[in-house]
Amino acid sequence: MISKSIQKQLDKHIPKREQQAFVELAVKTHIHKHIAMNAETIEVYVDGGSRGNPGLAGGGFVVFRGGENVLQGSEFYGEKTNNQSEYLALRTALREVYSRFPDLKIHCFMDSQLVVEQMNGNYKVKSANVRPLFDEVQRIVGQFKTFTIEHIERAQNSLADELANEAMDRAS
């Protein structure tokens, strides 16, 4: 049931024949946003890269809650290796997520199999230039209610990849 004041606004601004469709769209949009904002799990897509190894490096991330993009970002890292940039991108994403959603479950996706396997404890971190980043990311991860990380194919990570490339483009 629509209140009289809302009906007056509808009558004033929207033709009668379009009012029902407008109301249905408004309700659907509100319900979708409500579901998204009440989802307990955040999905974080992260990608880092360098042009050269080492080379100009950047990272990007996209955060979804209830299927809705709620946060995204990118950062230029200077001259780094590819693996350093992957960890820097993960660190950047997790810091941003923690500052906004500290009490939610985090499910992270990356196309770097090495980083995913290291984060899951399946591969050792042998590189001296990556170890401090790995340790820092592990400390951040320990602050979340739950954290999981999963490897995905590059094609499934196109938004984060695009943002990482935009970060590297800013330096060129």
Image (spheres, helix red, strand yellow):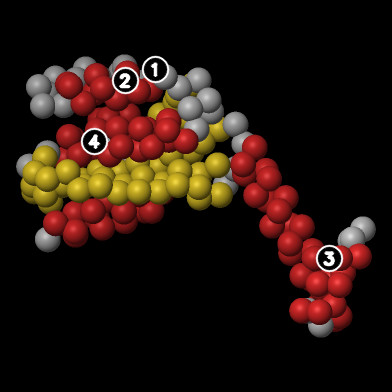
Asked if labels 1 and 2 touch by Cβ distance under 8 angstroms, the answer is yes
Question: In the figure, is residue 103 to the left or right of 18?
Answer: left
Q: x and y percent of residue 112 in the render?
A: 28, 37
| Residue in the picture at 8% in, 44% down | 79
Residue 10 sits in quarter: bottom right
Q: Earlier in the sequence, mark 1 or mark 3?
A: 3
Asked if labels 4 and 2 touch by Cβ distance under 8 angstroms, the answer is no
Q: Nearer the viewer, mark 3 or mark 4?
A: 3
Other residues around mark 4 within 10 Å, as few (<14) / some (14–19) / many (≥20): many
Q: Which residue is mark 2?
A: 138
Under circle 2, the secondary element is helix
Question: Distance from label 3 to label 4 (Cα)?
Answer: 49 Å
Q: For the C terminus, which image quadrant?
A: bottom left
Q: Which residue is mark 4?
A: 88
Question: Distance from label 2 to label 3 (Cα)?
Answer: 51 Å
Amino acid on which disc 3 is placed: Ile
Q: Which mark is residue 142?
A: 1
Q: Earlier in the sequence, mark 3 or mark 4?
A: 3
Q: Earlier in the sequence, mark 2 or mark 3?
A: 3
Question: Distance from label 2 to label 1 (Cα)?
Answer: 6 Å
Query: Between residues 167 and 84, which one lies in front from this camera angle?
Result: 167
